[in-house]
Amino acid sequence: MHETIKAACIQLNTGSDMQHNIKAAHALMREAVDKGAQYIALPENAFFMRGDEPSAVFGMDDHPGLLFCQQFASEHAVWILIGSIFVTIDESGKWANRSVLLNPQGQIVTSYDKIHLFDADFGDGECYRESDHFLSGKQARMAQLPCGELGLAICYDVRFARLFRDLARAGATVLSIPAAFAKRTGEAHWHVLLRARAIETGCYVIAPGQCGCHPKGRQTFGHSMIIDPWGVILAEAQQEPCVILADIDPQRVANVRRQMPVLTHDRDYILQDYVI
């Protein structure tokens, strides 16, 4: 039987000093626990923001941020979604941008490697080439939470609606979309994309974000959000590091999907020119 849980988004301003970033996250995670959070979600690039390249690279066995979160989860008996960490996975010299879900015993339940990599050039010097540094993930991932089935995604994935519809049709009732959304695109698209993903799937969306200025002048949008299956914004941060919380109620998903059963209304069609 699924149950209502209290979820928290931790909004961070991550830099290139990993130990400093861990301490900043710890303070906000403690605040979330004190406010009753049972599930804590961190943003993309939770413990290191690229700009200055790291002096050390880590795998899943020795990543300081992952080890810290495993200990925190077990000490406080909470679920933790690490929005993403950078880990080495082969000899290519590239990383995986990996989201990791921990249970209240601090064990890894599942992980997800970002599928869609952000390669964009705005023509005025602001340019992103994630594919230069990261390998694209190949597999969508889901995991069971006390409140329902969680579908995992990261940041730029939010622009690819088919991923979320596939997750929802496979059983997801909550979507995790941690991000380090660029300020320019966030101002234009963040709210509408997140609300659309909730509305078209009948899922809760939990979207913790990065905020403020980062190494080499990078700016992120903030505005972490928790959105209900009808598209209602239940909690929203602004542009400073903070905690936001909201209840995730599985009955709300059931009610919305009964009222608006869009997941059952897909139809096959042929795309071709109109001929009289």
Image: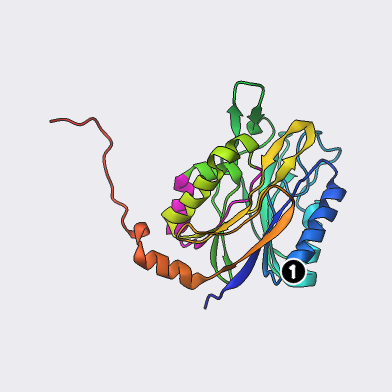
The residue depicted at 63 percent of the width and 41 percent of the height is 181
Q: Is residue 259 magenta?
A: no
- Answer whether residue 249 is visible to the viewer in this image: yes
| Residue at image mark 1 | 33
- In terms of depth relative to the viewer, which is nearer, 2 or 144? 2
What scheme was used to colour the molecule?
A: rainbow
| Residue 49 rendering spot, x and y as whole percentages | 76, 41
Farthest residue, direction left:
276
The answer to whether residue 61 is above or below residue 116 is below
The answer to whether residue 243 is above or below residue 238 is below
Q: Is residue 15 left or right of residue 257?
A: right
Q: Which residues are magenta?
A: 161-180
Q: Amino acid at mark 1?
A: Val
- In terms of depth relative to the viewer, which is nearer, 137 or 3? 3
Q: Is residue 81 left or right of residue 259?
A: right
The answer to whether residue 12 is above or below residue 74 is above
The residue depicted at 60 percent of the width and 47 percent of the height is 154
| Residue 165 rendering spot, x and y as whole percentages | 44, 52
- Answer whether residue 61 is visible to the viewer in this image: no
- In terms of depth relative to the viewer, which is nearer, 246 or 254? 246
| Residue 258 rendering spot, x and y as whole percentages | 36, 67
